[in-house]
Structures are given as structure tokens and as C-alpha cells.
Amino acid sequence: MDVLALVILAIAVLGVALVGSVLGLVVSRRRKPAPLPDTHTDVLVVPPVDPDAPPVELSAPPATLEPEAPAESLAPESLAPEVERPESTASRLVRLRQRLAGSQGGLGRGLLALLSRDRLDEDTWEDIEDTLLTADIGVAPTQELVDRLRARMRAEGGADARAVLREELLTLVDPTMDRSLRISGEDGNPGIVLVVGVNGAGKTTTVGKIARILVAEDRSVVLGAADTFRAAAVEQLSTWGERVGVDTIKGEEGADPASVAFRAVEEGRRTGVDTVIVDTAGRLQNKQGLMDELGKVKRVIEKQAPVTEVLLVLDATTGQNGLIQARVFSEAVAVTGIVLTKLDGSAKGGIVVAVQRELGVPVKLVGLGEGADDLAPFDSGAFVDALLGG
């Protein structure tokens, strides 16, 4: 083989080798190596085990606790006040005697001391008269009682002064008066009790206490908060009702009292309750305004059903001022009964006689304290015994 042929062969071999190298470089650049598998693992270091150590108990993770409901989410019913059971009438009468004896005994003891003197001269009779007047019995009833006592003590000689005084006081209080509350209606209507009196005499509180007396006798009741000029009176009456489970019909502050009274009677008739008790306003600008307002309330009520009882609430400690109030209210509306509040703690029990004589209507209820059940039916015999100190 000649030299030229060898040269050509060498050049051809070098060309082929060069082309192969270029092609291999291109292919290697297009191929990416597959990622190596992640062979990393966490290493758990286990401390050496003491063969003498007690076995370890593994506890389960704590359970997820449900969050407590906030106080605000509690249902209103769960916060409703517990309905009270008022005291019975019999129990009230027992306390009536006890409290009257403690508060009114001064009058009777004073009279007995004077009547028990060996000689009943004119000075003694004047002292007896003064004692009775101080007790707010009134001028006419006092003169009547003194005259009767003088006649009996003169005629009966050594008569028991206590027995004579009790009989004459009982006659003066007049046990023949009908003191029952007219709390029942006719022809399917509820009894309607209208309660009147000046603010400050305990009128709204008395309405609540009367409701308690009726509930204790298992009667159903609706209250009418027609004293709309005093927001406090409306809320106070509602609270009294809630305590014994009785509904109270209310209106906006300053609303027409007659309209509230009308709705109360309407509700009482609709639900078939036994008695509707209506509280009224006790403070107006003048006597004429008072008469007009109360007259309107009564007329509006009687478009649905007759008013069966009109109770006048008087503060027993006001004395002759109470008689003036009694006259005003009796002119505004026909009063059928009197409620004397705050009779405890005062020796002026003679107001019972005076106000009955003034209006010709009986004292039907007396209030003897601040407690919810410190209102009781008036008992003539218990009252006279209390005047005499038991």
C-alpha cells in the first residue's frame, strides 16, 4: 500500500472519531440524570434502658373539650324567678292580732287606766275624751263613745270597766258592716277591683299584696298597670305579678290610663280569669283633674264589665289628712271599701272609726308591715282586742 492511501485512511478514521465525540456530547447534554432517591431518615436516639426501673405507663392524649356556653346564651326561662306561694288568710289573721296588740295597745291601756279610777269626775272624762281625740277617732265618734260610757258606768255601778269599754268600742267600729271583697263578676265576667289613692300611701304595693291574697285562695288574676304617669309604679307592679305568676298589662309611660285599664279587663275576659285588679294614678294637678281621670277609667272599664269593688288606700298615719283624701276620692268615684296601710307602729288606730264614719263604707283590709304578706282582712273583734292590749 502506498503512502497516499495510508494518509487518506488515517484522515477518515479521525473524522469518524470526531463526529462520534460531538454526537455523544449533544446526547449527554439533553439527558438529565434521574434524581437520586431520598434515603434520609430521622434518627431516633433511644436512651439506655435500666432493667431495674418500673415499667412506664403511656397515657392517651387528652380528649378535646367542648367550650362552655357563655352566660349570655342561657335561655331566659332558666333565669325566670321562682313563683312564690303566698301566705294563707288564716295565717295572716293570726299575725294581724299579734301585731295590732303590739302597736295599738297604748290607747286601750290609757282608757282602762282612766275608767278604773275610784272616782270618775269631770276631769277624768275630759282626759278620756282627749285620749280618744289623740287617737284620731274623730270629734263626733268620740263624743258618742264618751256619752255611752258615762251612762253605762253610772247605771251599772261596779261594772267591769274593760268589758264595758270593749263592748262600746266594738259598737263604734261596727261589726255589722260587710267587709267581704267583691272579687267575683257575673255572667261570665271577672270581678274587677279598681284601686285608688294618693301616691305615697302604698297604693301600688297594696295592689300587689291583694293579688297575693287572691292567689293564696287559688284564684286567677290579671293586673292592670294604669298608673302610667310613673314608670316606677308600672315596673313595681310587674315585679309583684311575676313573683306569684300573675300577668300584668302595661302601656307606654304617659299612655292613656283608661286604655290600659280597658286592655287589662279585655285580657281578663279573654283568658277567663277570676279577678282583674287595676292600679290607678294618684297624683294629678288638681282635684277636678283627679275626678275626671278616675271617672273616665271607670266608665271605659264598664263598657266591657261592671266594676265590682273600688278600694281606697289610705295611710293610717296621716290622721285627718287621710279624711280629706277620702272625701276627694269618694267624690271622684264611688268607693266601696277602704284599705288602711301602715297601721303598725302607731297608736292612732281610731282612724278606722273616723274614716268609716266619713265615707259610710267599711275598712276591708289593713296593712301591718313591709312584708309581702303583711296585708290582712280587717277583723273588728281582733282590732278592738288589740286596742285593749290583747
Image (cartoon, rainbow, N blue to C red):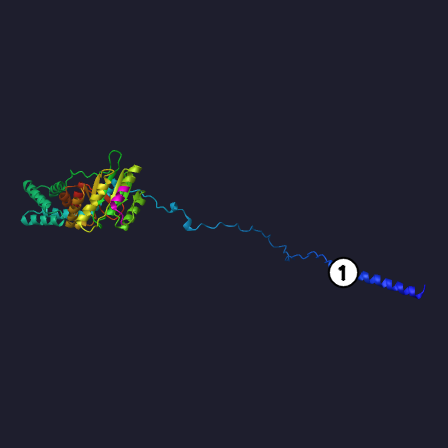
Q: In this view of the protein, which residue sits in the foreground, 30 or 82?
A: 30
Q: Is residue 209 visible?
A: no
Main secondary structure found in the magenta portion: helix
The residue indicated by pointer 1 is: 26
Magenta stretch encompasses residue 262:
yes
Q: How many labels sit on residues? A: 1
| Residue 129 in magenta stretch | no
Tag 1: amino acid: Val
Q: Secondary structure at mark 1?
A: helix
What residue is shown at x 19% (from left), y 46% (from top)? 292
Residue at the (88%, 64%) spot, across then down: 10
Q: Position of residue 185 (x, y in %)?
A: 24, 36
Please state, as top left, top right, bottom left or bottom right, where the C terminus lies in the image. top left
Q: Position of residue 44 (x, y in %)?
A: 64, 57
Between 88 and 239, the residue placed more toward the observer is: 239
Expressed as whole percent of the image width and height from the top left, the position of residue 300 reads 23, 41
Displayed quadrant of residue 20: bottom right
Q: Residues within 10 Å of mark 1 (few under 14, many from 20)?
A: few
Q: Is residue 127 left or right of residue 221?
A: left
On the image, the x and y values in percent for residue 248 come to: 30, 44
Q: Nearer the viewer, residue 165 or 346?
A: 346
Furthest residue to the top?
A: 187
Span shown in magenta: 254-263
